[in-house]
Amino acid sequence: MIGIVPFIFAGSSGSAVLLLLGQYLQGFGLGACLLPITTLALAGLAKAEIPRASAAFSVVQRVGARFGVTAIAVLLQGYLASHATSSALLADAFHATFWRVFAFSTVPFVLAFFLPSARPSLSRTRKGGFLRSAQQEVADEFDRLFER
């Protein structure tokens, strides 16, 4: 979400370094969110259910991304159709569009605070088995990566 801010304030002569930093922050944030989201989405499934659920989850992610990009493009095109007569007005169209993107991205950010904070017990899930070992591997990997 913070990676959108440089795009909001970029003018017609925006800094390429600042915009690249914004892109980097967006990519880092996306990468940091994908593993926990995928783990939560597949956490309560049996071993036999995981391949189909993973495929369905992937399809939903891809369709959702296309829908989001299309919605932003339509919004930008609406601004460009009414404002694109000079470079300053063109920059205003992008400015308004990125403000809307920032506002849209606050919705899931706020909703994330309503998610349950308790971590599910591994002993409750399908008597251990595949799910327990997969979750334990992820937990061990995180512990290994973030040891101090």
Image (tube, rainbow, N blue to C red):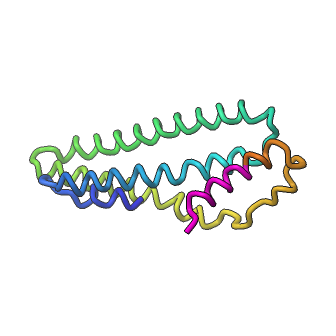
Kindly give the residue lying farthest to the left in the view shown.
Answer: 86
Residue 130: percent from left, percent from top? 80, 42
x 47%, y 50%: residue: 30
Kindly give the residue lying farthest to the right in the view shown.
Answer: 127
Residue 68: percent from left, percent from top? 45, 42
> Magenta part mainly helix, strand or loop?
helix
Residue 50: percent from left, percent from top? 74, 36
User: Is 38 in front, or is 102?
Assistant: 38
Q: Is residue 72 above or below residue 108?
A: above
x 74%, y 48%: residue: 43
Left or right relative to 102: residue 138: right
Q: In which quarter of the image is residue 131?
A: top right
Q: Give the range drawn in magenta.
A: 135-148
x 63%, y 53%: residue: 141
Residue 107: percent from left, percent from top? 51, 59
User: Is 72 in front, or is 19?
Assistant: 19
Which quadrant would the C terminus be assigned to in this image?
A: bottom right
| Residue 76 is a magenta residue | no
x 17%, y 48%: residue: 90
Q: Is residue 29 above or below residue 131?
A: below
Q: In which quarter of the image is residue 104?
A: bottom left
Q: Tell how many labels.
A: 0
Which quadrant would the N terminus be assigned to in this image?
A: bottom left
Left or right relative to 31: residue 121: right
Q: In this view, does 20 lie above or below 69?
A: below
